[in-house]
Amino acid sequence: MARREDGRFLTGQGSYVDDYRPARLLYAAFLRSPHAHARVVRIDASAALTLPGVAAVLTGEDLARSAKPVRAASKTPAVKVTSFPPLALGKVRHVGEAVVMVAAESRYVAEDAVERILVEYEPIPVVTDMEGALRPESPLLHDEAGTNLLVSREFARGDVDEALAGAALVVRERFRFHRHTPVCMENRGCLAEYATGSGTLTLRSSAQCPGLVRDVLSDLLDMPEHRIRVIAADVGGGFGAKASLYPEEIATCVMARRLGRPVKWIGDRREDLLATTHAWDEIVEAELGVDRDGAIVGLRAQVTADVGAYSIYPWTAAIEPVQTISFLPGPYRVPTYRGRTRGVATCKAPLGPYRGVGRPPAVFVIEGLMDRAARQLGLDPTEIRLRNFVRDEEFPYKSPSGIVWDRSSFTASLLRACEALDYAAVRAEQARARAAGRWLGVGVASYVELTGIGSAIPVSPGMPIATGTEAATIRFDPAGKVTAVFGVASHGQGLETTLAQIVADEVGVPIDDVRVIHGDTEVSPYGTGTYASRSLVLAGGAAILAGRAVREKMLVIAGHLLEADPADVVMTDGRWAVRGMLDRSVAAREIARAAYTGARRLPTGLEPGLEATRFYDPYYGTASNATHVAVVELDRETCAVKPLRYVVVEDCGRMVNPLIVDGQVHGGVAQGLGAALLEEIVYDDQGQLLSGTLMDYVVPSACEVPWMEVHHLETPSPVALGGFRGMGEGGTIGAPAAIANAVADALVPLGIEIAELPVTPDRLFRLIEHARARG
Amino acid sequence: MVTVRLNVNGVAHEGRCEPRKLLADFIREDLGLTGTHVGCEHGICGACTIMFNGEAARSCIMLAVQADGAELMTVEGLMRDGKLHPLQEAFREHHGLQCGFCTPGMLITALDLLRTNPSPTDREIREGISAVLCRCTGYQGIVNAVRAAAPTLVAGR
Ligand code: FES
Ligand code: FES
């Protein structure tokens, strides 16, 4: 089914934040730090304030008088809580940190004003290397923490040291997954309006989590929640980048409240690359022990993550490093495990969630180790995986980090992927290519991801805010049309379509009769937003519950109108009829009209109206899994990696809209492929960002992305309502590992392993030169 | 301030702006046509692509004054008689968009491609649309949409 939101996007009628232009609007610009680490000695904005058209200037100290500092709290001592001032207070900790805000009659004038502001900085030593930041002599980012080690945590099961000592084979590697960033095509932006008369604040923001932003603004600005409205109308991509609270959102609200005029800030691409959260920047040192048959006996690993300068709200600096270590064991039986993880502060932009959070590096590592073990044992990569997958009869299976996998299709997805690819034929072709001196490789990656997390576990470890529920309100109007309102927020996923499909099914109306509203805290029931592959599971589940409640009432009213026992009323073809007497029927419209007509047309004692709000909590959540297979060829001249085929077999449980599921996989794989081959955030050792434009940070274009063959298994989730499993992130989780393994496989004749991503042509060139020199 | 006279989507406009004003900002702010998006302001992402005297051009790296006397078409000009253009239809049918942010620039770029190459191969489609970055779709739905729309556009000539 085609999407219902497309009509406005195709005709230029979307309403992204920047498209809204209220009267008396002021435009904001930020002066950002050119230093990676410096004390702010003095700010002189007088020349800016005399520029015609400039309304106000806000410094960190001004702002601190109107808003509390952001502190991403944590219940676990594993996380050190530090402050993140919206505008620098006392010192700056990364290049691009916001220092001063200007509001003016146009963005052009605001930027002129920024240029006239003098800030005197006193540079202090910079630390950009995460391992260096752990040395005692390293410069300290946060005095209050007393260390740059903001996160440290360990998971263990059994005696891994003994298991590895007794293993037939131990493979080990130091993996490096470099820094990336999501790059939504719409830069971040927001617009705040404060109505002085009513004391209400409205923030329009390119946010994934309007509810979460509303809650925290209430605390920071000391305003009751019901006076704050956060709207995330159309949002041009999120991928996790827009899931956190950002300094500009707070500063914009403070400025609007202070001036009593609407204030808008729209980030440009430079600001996006400098100050939107980065991702996945980790070193993973890991050892995998297997027995003679390739069965895993133990896994020992240490993750070190460069979490950048600040711990972000609400996820904290722990989100990436802890997820990486939690998901490292993958879909395998791992009898003994010890995983340590560390999050280290450096003078770079903060690390935050990005599609897959922790899992793209984790899967790169475990799948890389599986391939290394297979090669040394002379096993096919598919064979070693089949021998180690959690078997169908072992579900639910508790992983060594304590996550419980419900019934999944690990084995089936791999077998199906081999069949779809015609694995044997591809291997035969590879042998021929190799004989002809070509570098052709096949890479396999299987993974499982936790999705749709309920209240049993926080989305990020120790995070004190509740993210385990979402709600749906389903309301019939007297004309028989349905409005369904949700606290989740779509930023490309097509929730206006999929949620409408679920609601239409539940209440028995055509989908065109359902309108979905989301992303507006003023009209939606309580919720946080869209992140962590949760929306279809949580909001879809809530839609089912609310739909059921409405349907029950419709049966009662229909029974009354038809003079039949409600138990005998059935819903067929959009009409509500008496079982066995299909000519005695009423339409939803008639039921709805009766519901609003009052006691005269309703059974005695039945409350008028036809609507329900229901909350859903999937408690533990569920899981999705997939196998990706990539076939790549390396150009012997340029060292470029060309993907020839890409097969995905994924299992997201019951699919509501296969077209949308495919689209999510395609987009996810393209991002994973970019991460594996092209994209890298680069800082120099003084903390200057070298990849500050889209010329330097290379996002794949249509020419770099291969045709993708996507197949589905539909193992309904045994634990989530509707059988849904979330799936928005999966493509990005599997692709880096599949590509890395394919590149390594192509280079088997040279004995090259891929331990660093992205594997750019110059990295490959150096690896190949090195291997040749080695002979 | 300078005066800019131009024709956009068949309608004559006259506006006054600073000489430094970008064409993309002029289209969005002065003409109120917010369908044209700005994704990078440095000529890479293609979100701001419009038809400029019949050819695709990036409105973020042009000044409004350069468009004096020009004929432009933006995404708002694609519909005819309240009906979607066949390319828009194809994007909808083949899921050629998700968040919709790249879509206006992508539609204009694809239209330009089909104007110069009415029946492109998949490789040519990919090359043609590589001027616009899309972060959501992995381009597959877009390639499918352009391929499907090509014969309809030829037939409609
Ligand atoms: S905004 Fe013009 S090319 Fe990106
Ligand atoms: S649809 Fe989101 S960037 Fe293309």
Image (cartoon, coloured by chain):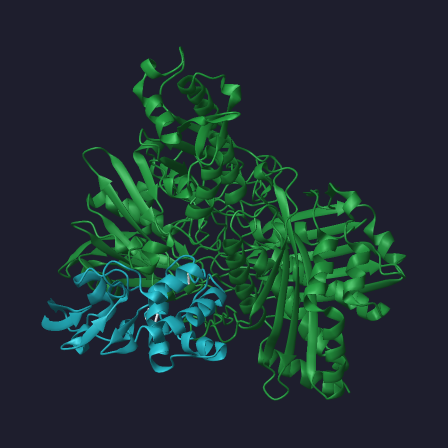
Q: Is residue A302 left or right of residue A665?
A: right
Q: Residue at x 18, y 75 (%)?
A: B71
Q: Residue at x 43, y 41 (%)?
A: A212
| Image spot of residue A351 (x, y percent) | 51, 56
- Which quadrant, please, contains the C terminus of chain A? bottom right
A276 is higher (above) or lower (below) than A201 = below
Chain for colour cyan: B
Q: Nearer the viewer, residue A20 or A2?
A: A2
| Image spot of residue A366 (x, y percent) | 71, 60
Quarter of the image where ligand 1 sits: bottom left
Q: Is residue A131 left or right of residue A704?
A: right
| Image spot of residue A24 (x, y percent) | 16, 50
Q: Nearer the viewer, residue A737 or A283?
A: A737
Chain for colour green: A
Q: Is residue A12 left or right of residue A555?
A: left
Quarter of the view holding residue B16 = bottom left
